[in-house]
Amino acid sequence: MIERFVLSGTGGQGVITAAIILAESALHHTGFHAVQTQVYGPEARGGSARSDVIIADREILFPKVLEPNVLVCLSQMAYDRYCSLVRPGGVVITDPHYVKRWQHASSRHVEVPLHDTAMRELGSTQAINICLLGALVRLIPIVPLDGVREVVSHRFPERFREANSAALDLGAGLVKESVTTF
Amino acid sequence: MAVTDYLRKRFMPHIWCPGCGHGIIMRALLSAVEKLGLDKNDIVMASGIGCSARMLGYVDAHTMHTLHGRALAFATGVKMARPDLTVVVPMGDGDALAIGGNHFIHAARRNIDMTAIVMNNSTYGMTGGQYSPTTGCGEYGTTAPYGTVVQPFDTVELASAAGASFIARTTTYHAREMARILADAIRHPGFSVVEVLTQCPTYYGRKNAKGDAVEMMEGFRDCAVPVGPLDDSGHATVTIDPEAVDAPIPIGVFRKEVRAEYCDAYRRQVIEPAEAAAAASAAASAAAGGEQ
Amino acid sequence: MSTAGQTERSRVQFLQGNEVCAEAALYAGMRYFAGYPITPSTEIAERLAERLPQVGGSFMQMEDEIGSICAVIGASLAGTKSMTATSGPGFSLMQEAIGYAVMAEIPCVIVDVQRGGPSTGLPTHASQGDVMQVRYGTHGDHSIVCLTASNHQDLFGIVVDAFNFSEVFRTPAVVLIDEVVGHMREAVRVPEPGELDLTERLLTDVPRDVDYHPYAPREDDRLPMSNFGGVHRYNVTGLVHDMWGFPSEKPKIVNDLIHHLYLKLENRKQMLTRWREWSLDDAEIVLISYGSSARSARHIMENRRSVGVPIGMIELQTLWPFPSEMIRTKCRHAEYIVVVEMNMGQIVHEVKRAVDRPERVFLSNRVDGEMITPTDIKHLIRVIQGKGV
């Protein structure tokens, strides 16, 4: 088993933090190996953000993802740039608020309305990356949701614990069933 | 203990030229150290490169002859490892103000407890008399055969702007006062700068027709103007009558103020709270582990 | 969860390579760090700014990289294990002071997280272009210790080794990693206290008031030290010096010192060499790699093995002094040797010097800032075998 994720979007959305939490959750709450890398640009905010995560049942040597099984795009620029990299049988996850999709026959496309739901239920998109994690592990059930919850609770200050837990459930609630990526 | 007890006589004779003022500075420093009654094992001296830097080979302390301009950075590491030691850094004018200028201003800004002695002879003596950051505009050196075209640094002004908390200037003519100032500087808990104007008859004096060593020292005597006493904030007033002296040299203690010293401030603001928080966190997780 | 389980869980951490360097240095007993921010090494400084005071140590942000390495050398001379971390441009600035630590024989550790060069180059991209700079970057004849690793568990041990070697041989030791390893996150198990051996400084047993010769090596080339502030006062200098540390230009003293500085390391490769190897017994093709490139090399080695290609691999963890004897012996029967590195060819020349029949040695490289891929290496192997790409 090897699952290759690319999480992409705009700097400041928190996709890199989401990638780190996904990989760390896999490490602590599954028997799998996990590696996370990211592409660095000079901007701290704005610009594009991309992080790669590999989760596998064996030692991970080459740490970069050239062809993801799972691609998450929270910006049009990221979608346009990375969509064609997805392996046949893979899945592309986008938020219709950010991404206008175009056809790509060999992969499946799942739209999750993270932005609009977060604005409606939480009043801001500050925790959109945590919502994304909830949706992502419901869709690709490689890591238990409560495992992610535990890692999130350790990663942020105590005062955010409840809000993050709610954001995680909010995201998970947006996905009805899981998909397989092979 | 006698002053000569602080010397490494094994490594004499020294390398300085006849008439060089550096020996006078070493004598004044040893007098200050002797007056303060410092234990030789508690003294660290770090120097850079140049004639000034060779002083510490002759001093029976922990001595570190380092890289050109970098002595203050080496000394900073020593002080951080052993804040209890007395650190003295003799430097030349090129060492302190040209290649080491960055370390000089940042050591001053940090106010780390050490004494920088800027032995200013207005030239690079060891390499044969090139112009330095303190060579006067229009003066000569082997790399300024037509005279320099830039203004010299004023060491006192520079140290003051950078935030040194003890600043003084003296000359090799004022040897006894120099010993008193150096003792005061070493005792001061912060970054101390003592500029000592010293003669290099071999290069600077010869190139600029300043006469022999004695004449150069007489020049220091005639141009020196003592600064006023320190006010309540630790600052001295400099009053110069331009009619009285041609090319006056203000001497004395310009500043002596008490400010947070770096090692002390780092311990109080950073180490102590961080250690306490880490200990509390370890105790909490041990307690939580015990309950389960 | 049991207490033991919880402890074990907190021992396994998901860290960047840079953070591993910081944690391993603390484990080794490092208590003074001076540095200057530079991508891609900055996370080392950031973590130590927080962690060092928690264990009673000091972090210091200096005015530049020159000041950083000088402060580190000063603190070490006064008895504190010390380290700095930087990347190419800062490493270039440190070269003069590294030579001082070589000459004055003061232990210290420098982490260089390589980025693309020359000059400002590619601050956030992968490269292994500093290998020769570690060896020859400071002027004058000398030898130096340089260690590297491709994964975080090995990296932890290698950083501890660097501190140990630096103390044993009183030399600067360089931990040379690259952007990929520095920024990548993966699991690392922080060893229990006492699990890894730590070498403490060899202090002189010469009593107070007895003439101590700080620079008179023992027969094993080691120099028992007296820390600044101790009972022995002596002179330390970057000039050629005699056994008291006092400057000397006598030809015999110069000759002995240069030989000592060079041979104390070059004669002890057996102790200094760290490496890993896979499937060398029947290997017709041997890959030699290090750092993040070794991850791609091992990936393709295992992939080719699985389809019956007789291929093996050596991952170098000690780059300097170069383990030429080990390479010569292990590559004796190889038909082809492929050195995988992200530069225009640096270790490949050392391998060519080490082996007989150097025409067997090929370079698989990549210098565009992207990490070399297993496919890049596979293509070269196929070309060598005459199979095309």
Image (cartoon, helix red, strand yellow):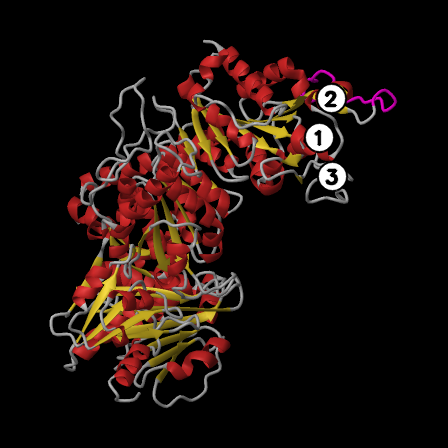
Q: Secondary structure at mark 1?
A: helix
Q: Say what secondary structure mark 2 lies in.
A: helix
SS under mark 3: loop
Q: Amino acid at mark 3?
A: Tyr
Residue at image mark 2: B215
- Compared with B151, B222 (above or below) is above
Q: Which residue is mark 1?
A: B205
The residue segment tinted magenta is B227-245
Chain identifier of the residue bearing label 1 in the image:
B
C168 in relation to B79, above or below: below
Residue occupied by mark 3: B140
Is A49 a magenta residue?
A: no
Whole-percent x, y for residue C149 in the image: 29, 58
Q: Is residue C226 left or right of residue A30?
A: right
**Pointer 2 chain:** B
Rendered image quadrant of residue C325: bottom left
Q: Name the side, left or right, on which A88 lies relative to A126.
A: left
Placement of B277 over or under A128, stated as above or below: above
Q: Residue furthest left?
A: C281
User: Mark 3 and mark 1, same subunit?
Assistant: yes
Q: Residues within 10 Å of mark 1 (few under 14, many from 20)?
A: many
The prevailing secondary structure element of the residues shown in magenta is loop
**Count of number-bearing discs:** 3
Do the CB atoms of the residues marked 2 and 1 lie less than 8 Å apart?
A: yes
Mark 1 residue type = Gly
The amino acid marked with disc number 2 is Glu
Q: Which residue ends up furthest to the right in the rendered image?
A: B243
Residue B285, compared with residue C155, is above or below; it is above
Q: CA distance from mark 2 to mark 3?
A: 18 Å
User: Would you say residue B238 sits in the magenta stretch?
Assistant: yes
Give the residue drawn at x 23%, y 68%: C355
